[in-house]
């Protein structure tokens, strides 16, 4: 097939003992830990699931320099467990979400221009420019589910220059992974290659040029990014 110009190459993530994982789309869940809902000014009882998206091209590989982006004075990283799907579908029942659907897990950073996000929220505008900008989805290599087992609890942490900023347990997610896949697949058809960023625990705050960010989820490869 000839194209008007050479098509963009497929974005991939390395995966332990596997061929590279081709990324199709990135779904991100908002406010999925009670303590983070509260720090963002919300209440858990009124909480309903919501998702936003980042383009696959926003992936930034592990051990990279993250170029400090334009048009923000409040860049904030959010450490998140990432779920990588190798099977999709519509209306996937929660009790069917197992290794058939889940290829594996990774550690991700939902990089956020917090000042733009707050301004957009106040005006009722979309978040895209605050959340889906270039390199806004740093992500570690994927640990296949075969090696990690099903992840339902374990420490999730973010360190900046060696100091703990965010600390939580993925067992404290409000919407669990099977329910998340069910909810999303009731809205749209999921496909192999889709990634789900599952929300961040409390402790968000800004980073500046030169900061070294270390994001960890127990049992997975750490994600280390330097702000440049
Ligand atoms: Mn997030």
Image (cartoon, rainbow, N blue to C red):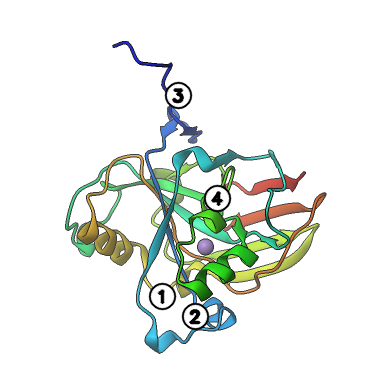
Is residue 217 placed above or below 141 in the rendered structure?
A: below
Q: Secondary structure at mark 2?
A: helix
Q: Residues at badges 1 and 2 in contact (C-beta under 8 Å)?
A: yes
Q: Residues at badges 1 and 4 in contact (C-beta under 8 Å)?
A: no
Q: Residues at badges 3 and 4 in contact (C-beta under 8 Å)?
A: no
| Distance from mark 1 CB to nearest ligand 1 atom below 8 Å | no
Closer to viewer: mark 1 or mark 4? 1
- Which residue is the site of mark 2? 34
Q: Is residue 219 at least partly visible in the picture?
A: no
- Which residue is the site of mark 3? 9
Q: Secondary structure at mark 4?
A: loop
Local crowd at mark 1 within 10 Å, few (<14), some, or many (≥20)?
some
| Dot label at residue 174 | 1
- The disc, 2 or 3, on the residue closer to the chain's N-terminal end is 3
- Which residue is the site of mark 4? 220
Is residue 122 placed above or below 145 in the rendered structure?
A: below
Q: Secondary structure at mark 1?
A: loop
Q: Disc 1 to disc 4, how far (Cα)? A: 21 Å
Picture quarter containing residue 45?
bottom left
141 or 123, which is in the foreground?
Answer: 123
Picture quarter containing residue 91?
bottom left
Relative to 140, 224 lies left or right: right
- The disc, 1 or 4, on the residue closer to the chain's N-terminal end is 1
Q: Disc 4 to disc 2, how far (Cα)? A: 23 Å
Across the whole image, how many numbered discs are drawn on residues? Answer: 4
Q: Is residue 134 at least partly visible in the picture?
A: yes
Closer to viewer: mark 2 or mark 3? 3
| Distance from mark 3 CB to nearest ligand 1 atom below 8 Å | no
Percent coordinates x, y for residue 66 in the rendering: 69, 43
Q: Residues at badges 2 and 3 in contact (C-beta under 8 Å)?
A: no
- The disc, 1 or 2, on the residue closer to the chain's N-terminal end is 2
Viewport quadrant of the C terminus: top right
């Amino acid at each position: 097939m000839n194209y008007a110009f050479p098509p963009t190459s497929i974005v991939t993530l390395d995966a332990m003992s596997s061929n590279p994982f081709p990324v199709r789309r990135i779904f991100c869940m908002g406010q999925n830990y009670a303590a983070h809902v509260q720090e963002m000014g919300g209440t858990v009882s009124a909480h309903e699931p919501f998702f936003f998206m980042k383009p696959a091209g926003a992936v930034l590989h592990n051990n990279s320099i993250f170029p400090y982006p334009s048009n923000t004075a409040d860049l904030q990283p959010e450490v998140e467990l990432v779920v990588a799907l190798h099977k999709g579908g519509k209306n996937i029942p929660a009790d069917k979400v197992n290794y058939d659907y889940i290829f594996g897990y990774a550690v991700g950073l939902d990089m956020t221009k917090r000042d733009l996000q707050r301004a957009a929220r106040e005006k009722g505008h979309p978040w895209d420019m605050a959340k889906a900008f270039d390199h806004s989805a740093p992500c570690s290599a994927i640990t296949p589910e075969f090696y990690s087992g099903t992840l339902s609890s374990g420490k999730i942490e973010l360190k900046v220059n060696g100091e703990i900023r965010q600390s939580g347990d993925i067992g404290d997610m409000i919407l669990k992974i099977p329910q998340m896949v069910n909810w999303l697949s009731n809205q749209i058809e999921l496909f192999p290659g889709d990634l789900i960023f599952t929300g961040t625990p409390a402790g968000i705050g800004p980073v500046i040029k030169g900061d070294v960010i270390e994001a960890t989820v127990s049992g997975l490869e750490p994600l280390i990014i330097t702000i440049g």
